[in-house]
Image: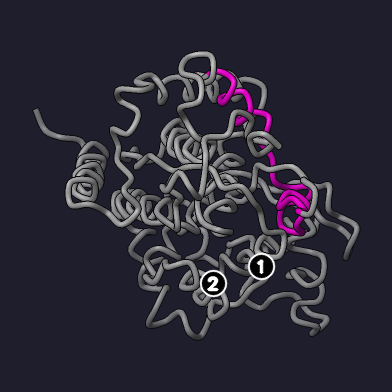
């Protein structure tokens, strides 16, 4: 029987992940980390997510965003989940997270279920990594072997969270920020940006300064010239005033807003990327010899996108994980450090 393209993608990525384990990856993460101590960990997290999705169609996109925002600040250590502590302000209150990062309650539910099954074993950082993969898979995207074994950090960084890649940034700035965390390939930047193929975005990220694409792009008092006029007219109906639009939500992908597919890239091809940071991948003058050819490839081939996305998620999940017990712990409660 012929192997499906999607199964082939999963097999290639899984083989790459196993190779990392067998050859002693620097982070010492492995797919089978919980096979003996909590063998049902994946299925437990998956069931929590399925239950949450019944009442919240946005939750899958929200959970992968939590994983992104966690890994880009202090590495993949669960720091985004911590509440305020004495002498430490939570990353939840950073501008990119306040009022928009969500899904904390689902992570807490997954943690509670895992504590019932295997107390003190599965870290909150690993829950975020598992939830991201499961969210993509359940939305029609690729499956990959999640490398596990992260410990949870004991601190957070609001300053780091305030420096996350932003929706109004240029291609040059995005490339610099990805390289700063060790994601040195433009494939990682373009593939991981493809997570914007599902989920929602507030009007403040497209119609309010400094992200105003509709009314006053870069202080010109004109719209962003790379924005398709018909799409701009549609967005103006959604976000009718400059500033003050923040509660209004818009589909990141207007074609298939809740499916994980390649339509993010086909939208960029016709100047319908909703965020400046999205369209920059295709339309920036710097994109021609860097990111634009990758956008073109992914717009043509969903299999190519899925394969690259899966590998880039593994790469991102390996940003500075804590594996030394003297530096981290398995939190009993994802919101606070043990014994705090």
| Residue at the image position 46 percent from the left and 41 percent from the top | 129
Q: Does 136 appear above or below 72? A: above
| Residue at the image position 77 percent from the left and 59 percent from the top | 95
Locate residue 230, reporting x and y percent: 67, 62
Residue 93 belongs to the span the image colors magenta = yes
1 and 2 marks in contact (CB < 8 Å): yes
Q: Mark 2 sits on what residue?
A: 177
Spot the residue most to the top.
Answer: 116
**Alpha-carbon span between mark 1 and mark 2:** 9 Å
Residue 305 in view of the camera: no
Locate residue 261, reporting x and y percent: 43, 45
**Depth check, front residue: 104 or 34:** 34
Locate residue 109, reporting x and y percent: 62, 23
In which quadrant of the rendered view does residue 174 lie?
A: bottom right
Residue 274 belongs to the span the image colors magenta = no
Locate residue 322, reporting x and y percent: 46, 50
**Depth check, front residue: 322 or 219:** 322
Spot the residue most to the left.
Answer: 1
Residue 240 in view of the camera: yes
Q: Is residue 18 left or right of residue 236?
A: left
Q: Does 282 appear above or below 69? A: below
| Residue at the image position 71 percent from the left and 65 percent from the top | 159
The region drawn magenta spans: 88-113
Q: Mark 1 sits on what residue?
A: 163
Q: Does 21 appear above or below 232? A: above
**Residue 276 image label:** none
**Depth check, front residue: 252 or 191:** 191
| Residue at the image position 64 percent from the left and 51 percent from the top | 155
Quadrant location, the N terminus:
top left
Crowd class of label 2 (few under 14; some 14 to 19; many from 20; radius 10 Å)? some
Tell me which label, 1 or 2, sits earlier in the chain: 1
């Amino acid at each position: 029987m012929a192997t499906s393209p999607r199964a082939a993608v999963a097999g290639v990525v899984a083989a790459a992940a196993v190779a990392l384990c067998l050859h002693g990856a620097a982070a010492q993460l492995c797919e089978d980390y919980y096979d003996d101590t909590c063998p049902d960990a994946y299925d437990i997290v998956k069931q929590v997510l399925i239950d949450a999705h019944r009442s919240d169609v946005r939750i899958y996109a929200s959970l992968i965003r939590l994983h992104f925002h966690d890994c880009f600040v202090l590495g993949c250590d669960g720091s985004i989940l911590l509440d305020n502590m004495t002498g430490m302000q939570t990353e939840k209150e950073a501008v990119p997270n306040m009022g928009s990062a969500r899904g904390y309650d689902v992570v807490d539910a997954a943690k509670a279920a895992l504590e019932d099954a295997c107390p003190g074993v599965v870290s909150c950082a690993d829950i975020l990594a598992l939830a991201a993969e499961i969210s993509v898979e359940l939305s029609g995207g690729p499956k990959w072997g999640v490398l596990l074994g992260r410990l949870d950090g004991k601190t957070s960084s609001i300053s780091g969270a305030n420096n996350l890649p932003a929706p109004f940034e240029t291609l040059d700035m995005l490339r610099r920020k990805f390289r700063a965390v060790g994601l040195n390939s433009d494939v990682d930047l373009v593939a991981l940006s493809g997570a914007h193929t599902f989920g929602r975005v507030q009007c403040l990220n497209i119609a309010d300064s400094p992200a105003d694409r509709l009314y006053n792009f870069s202080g010109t008092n004109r719209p962003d010239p790379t924005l398709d006029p018909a799409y701009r007219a549609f967005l103006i109906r959604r976000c009718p005033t400059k500033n003050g639009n923040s509660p209004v939500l818009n589909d990141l992908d207007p074609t298939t807003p809740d499916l994980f597919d390649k339509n993010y890239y086909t939208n960029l091809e016709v100047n319908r990327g909703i965020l400046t940071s999205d369209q920059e991948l295709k339309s920036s003058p710097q994109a021609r010899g860097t990111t634009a050819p990758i956008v073109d490839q992914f717009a043509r081939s969903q299999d190519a996108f899925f394969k690259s996305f899966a590998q880039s998620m593994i790469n991102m999940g390996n940003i500075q994980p804590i594996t030394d017990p003297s530096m981290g712990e398995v939190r009993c409660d994802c919101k606070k450090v043990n014994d705090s």
